[in-house]
Image: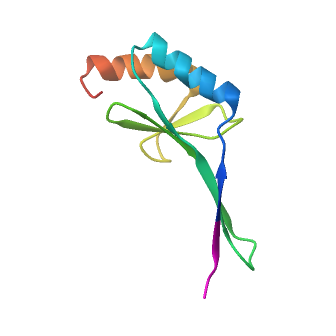
């Protein structure tokens, strides 16, 4: 039987502040959920679950110390510096 161990990863203060600041600039309220490390005991298999930020209908996945933001899945991504413009465009398209 597999034993799975999960440890919560706290989002860094700097990333949290950046996300909250973008929320103020875009007049939205981000909901932040911490990521985690999922490890299968007795093996060297581990998965890092990203931090989840919910803004409107979209889910943004972020890792600490990473410049990319994944939108709704790990296949479509943008740079963090483009996030504010992306949220504003989504608000204009009524997808938020």
| Res 40 → quadrant | bottom right
Q: Choose between 2 and 95: the one closer to the eye.
A: 2
**Residue at 55% across / 16% down in the picture?**
21
Q: Residue at x 41, y 24 (%)?
A: 29
Q: Position of residue 4 (x, y in %)?
A: 62, 73
| Image vertical order of residue 54 relative to residue 4, above or below | above
Residue drawn at 63 percent across, 41 percent down: 63
Task: Say which of 93 and 49 sits in front.
Answer: 49
Identify the image quadrant of the C terminus: top left
Visible in this render: residue 49?
no
Residue 80 is situated, as x and y percent measured from the top left of the image, at 58, 26
Q: Quadrant of the N terminus?
A: bottom right
Main secondary structure found in the magenta portion = loop
Q: Is residue 30 above or below residue 10?
A: above
In the rendered picture of this protein, how many numbered marks are placed on residues? Answer: 0
**Colour approach in the figure:** rainbow
Q: Residue furthest bottom?
A: 1
Residue at the farthest top position: 25
Q: Is residue 14 visible?
A: yes
**Residue 6 coordinates in the image, percent (x, y):** 63, 63
Left-right relation of 87 to 65: left
Image point (51%, 17%), residue name:
22
In-image side of 85 versus 20 (left or right): left
Magenta segment boundaries in residue numbering: 1-5
Magenta run includes residue 72: no
The location of residue 75, given as percent across then percent down, is 48, 46
Relative to 10, residue 13 above or below = above
Q: Extreme left residue here?
A: 94
Q: Is residue 12 above or below residue 19?
A: below
């Amino acid at each position: 039987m597999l034993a799975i161990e999960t440890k919560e990863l706290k989002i860094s203060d700097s990333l949290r502040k950046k996300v909250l600041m973008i929320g103020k600039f875009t007049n939205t309220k981000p909901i932040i959920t911490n990521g985690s490390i999922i490890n299968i005991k007795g093996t060297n298999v581990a998965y890092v679950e990203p931090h989840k930020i919910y803004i409107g209908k979209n889910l943004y996945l972020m890792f600490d110390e990473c410049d990319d933001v994944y939108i709704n899945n790990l296949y479509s991504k943008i740079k963090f510096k483009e996030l504010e413009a992306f949220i504003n465009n989504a608000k204009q398209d009524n997808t938020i």
